[in-house]
């Protein structure tokens, strides 16, 4: 999915999550000739009702006020408000939902949404460059559509804490996250011992990687992810494929290449076919080295099909 809506989600004044990230992806997408091979979808903006499926009304009103003012922060200092940030963030959520709906309708079996995958936002607050959690909204909307077992796989360098803690006690959300060890990187969560609570105990898999982990280390851990999914036979797979786990990212310490992202996309697509539905929704996530995100995300697209 590509649209001029998505570049609107980006922070000004040299912020790592700048609006130019989408352009870096789009240029590489064109160079690889992918527009001739995939169907482009036009996304929409998420409604307030859809946003409320995950976020609290009070938080939505807070973002709306800061969006109108165009100043201040939405969290402790990582996520600045800018004029129109509510609408820009709602556009990212709408893009994710548009892709999800296309998959459910059978218009396509798999889809990719750049810029999306804002996995740090909690139900009642922003965090880590993430205003609204499109992953969480998509999970809630899938549940409303009757999807009972949803797999969420995250290979961003940062732990997907906004998704994990929102569904920590939900046995219907099968969670698997490969990330840089929280002792060395924000948000400091995602320990191996965090496996879910209550009836959801054992449905969550956190795999912290040491700083400097490369494709060889990824290859050692990745089979645990696919084995974990196989235990639960999910009906829909979401892949958050943040490119900040590639070597050379300015704010992380992993050393993967785009090959690991391609492997994740390819093997999850194969798994989805084996589960009888083929449904994979991939979301761009983090990545602050523009060349890295262009390589990783376009390699994901190539390996989804």
Image (tube, helix red, strand yellow):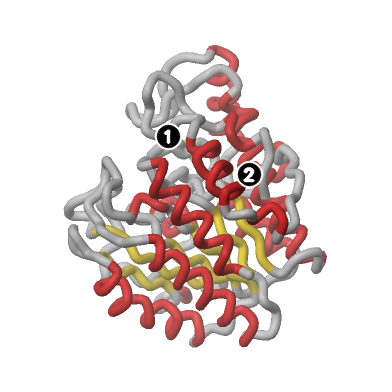
Q: Is there any visible trace of residue 288 in the rendered image?
A: yes
Q: Position of residue 186 (x, y in %)?
A: 27, 46
Nearer to the camera, 53 or 190: 190
Q: Position of residue 168 (x, y in %)?
A: 44, 63
In the picture, which quadrant includes the C terminus? bottom right
Name the residue at 59% across, 29% down: 8
From the viewer's perspective, tell me whether residue 230 is left or right of residue 188. right
Name the residue at 22% across, 52% down: 253
Tell me the distance, in whole angstroms, between the alpha carbons under discs 1 and 2: 17 Å
Q: Position of residue 122 (x, y in %)?
A: 46, 45
Nearer to the camera, 153 or 171: 153
Question: Tag 2's secondary structure?
Answer: helix
Bin the neighbour count of mark 1 within 10 Å (Cα to Cα): few under 14, some 14-19, many 20 and up: many
Residue ID for mark 2: 93
- Above or below for 101 versus 131: below
Examine the image and state in which quarter residue 64 appears.
Answer: top right
From the viewer's perspective, tell me whether residue 231 is left or right of residue 142. left
Nearer to the camera, 188 or 208: 208
Examine the image and state in which quarter residue 214 appears.
Answer: bottom left
Pointer 1 or 2: first along the chain = 1
Residue ID for mark 1: 17
From the viewer's perspective, tell me whether residue 268 is left or right of residue 39. left
Q: Position of residue 116 (x, y in %)?
A: 55, 47
Name the residue at 44% across, 51% down: 162
From the viewer's perspective, tell me whether residue 109 is left or right of residue 82. right
Say the numbered circle drawn on residue 293: none
Question: Tag 1's secondary structure?
Answer: loop
Bin the neighbour count of mark 2 within 10 Å (Cα to Cα): few under 14, some 14-19, many 20 and up: many
- Above or below for 66 versus 99: above
Name the residue at 36% across, 76% down: 222
Examine the image and state in which quarter residue 195 appears.
Answer: bottom left
């Amino acid at each position: 999915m590509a649209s001029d809506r998505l570049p609107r989600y980006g922070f000004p004044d040299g912020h790592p999550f700048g609006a130019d990230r989408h352009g870096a992806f789009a240029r590489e997408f064109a160079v690889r000739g992918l527009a001739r091979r995939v169907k482009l979808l036009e996304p929409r903006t998420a409604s307030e009702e859809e946003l409320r499926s995950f976020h609290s009304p009070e938080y939505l009103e807070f973002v709306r006020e800061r969006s109108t003012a165009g100043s201040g922060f939405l969290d402790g200092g990582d996520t600045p408000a800018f004029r129109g940030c509510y609408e820009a963030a709602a556009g990212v959520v709408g893009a994710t939902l548009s892709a999800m709906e296309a998959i459910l309708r059978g218009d396509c079996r798999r889809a990719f949404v750049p810029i999306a995958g804002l996995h740090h936002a909690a139900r009642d607050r922003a965090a880590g460059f993430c205003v609204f959690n499109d992953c969480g909204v998509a999970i809630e909307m899938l549940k409303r559509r009757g999807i009972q077992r949803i797999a969420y796989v995250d290979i961003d360098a940062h732990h997907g804490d906004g998704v994990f803690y929102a569904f920590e006690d939900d046995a219907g959300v099968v969670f698997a996250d490969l990330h840089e060890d929280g002792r060395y990187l924000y948000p400091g969560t995602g320990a191996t011992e965090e496996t879910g609570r209550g009836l959801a105990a054992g449905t969550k898999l956190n795999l912290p990687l040491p700083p400097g982990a490369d494709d060889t280390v990824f290859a050692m851990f990745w089979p645990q992810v696919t084995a974990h999914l196989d235990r639960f036979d999910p009906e829909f797979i979401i892949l958050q494929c943040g490119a900040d786990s590639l070597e050379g990212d300015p704010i992380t310490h992993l050393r993967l290449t785009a090959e690991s992202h391609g492997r994740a996309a390819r093997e999850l697509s194969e798994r989805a076919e084996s589960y009888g539905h083929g449904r994979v929704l991939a979301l761009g996530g983090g990545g602050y080295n523009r060349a890295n995100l262009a390589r990783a995300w376009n390699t994901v697209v190539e390996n989804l099909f």
